[in-house]
Amino acid sequence: MLFDGECNLCNGAVDFLLCRDPRGRLRFAALQSPAAARLLAGARAPTPLPDSLVLVADGAVHVRSGAALRIVARLRWPWPLLFVFWLVPRPLRDLAYDFVARRRTRWFGRRSSCRVPTPEERGRFLEDGPGPV
């Protein structure tokens, strides 16, 4: 999962997901990081991408509400129940997603730098060093 490392809502979402994904199925990187750039280049990501949330999984790049729903489907019970929103037509889901995404920094604020994982979380974050992700 790639997230806006300077957005407080996005960073809060990462904290939320870390706690609810005990099997460690999700790995994270800030969209602003070299690791995200390498991952997106390798996945042949379409452009432009949203600046809030991107999921690279199952050989594809997922964005907006589709990414969010695929993420909750990977969490422990009861969060996968939210996948029922897949039944809502994508234009409507994305409209709601975009409404929040456009206002997220106004409502939740912004950080001056990207989130730094704790030593315990480090294995869940993609490395920013050279080489493939």
Image: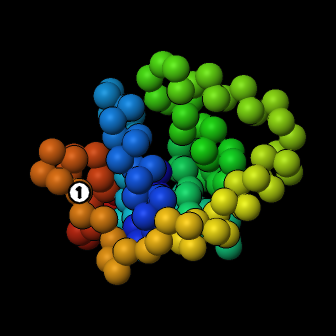
> Which residue lies at the image location 80% right of the left edge and 56% below the top edge?
95
Residue positioned 73% across, 61% down in the render: 99
Q: Secondary structure at mark 1?
A: loop
Q: Percent from the top left, x then y, of residue 111?
A: 37, 74
For image coordinates 75% across by 33% down, the residue present is 86
Q: Nearer the viewer, residue 109 or 29?
A: 109
Number of marks drawn: 1
**Quadrant of residue 84 within the rendered picture:** top right
Q: Is residue 131 above or below residue 55?
A: below
Q: Give the vertical position of 17 relative to 62 (above or below).
A: above
In this figure, which colouring scheme has been used for the structure? rainbow
In the rendered image of this protein, does residue 119 appear above or below residue 112?
A: above
In the visual, does 7 lie left or right of 122?
right
* The residue positioned farthest toward the left in the image shown: 119
Vertical order, 103 against 62 (above or below): below
The residue most toward the top is 77
In the image, 34 versus 83, the foreground residue is 83
Q: Amino acid at mark 1?
A: Pro
Q: Callout 1: few (<14), some (14-19), or many (20+) C-alpha neighbours within 10 Å?
A: some
Q: Is residue 88 left or right of residue 119?
A: right
In this rendering, does residue 36 appear at all? no
Residue positioned most to the front: 107
Residue depicted at 57% across the width and 73% down the height? 106
Q: Residue 48 in the image: state x and y as whole percent.
A: 68, 73
Q: Position of residue 92 (x, y in %)?
A: 85, 48
| Residue 85 visible in the picture | yes
Q: Which quadrant: the C terminus?
A: bottom left
Identify residue for label 1: 117
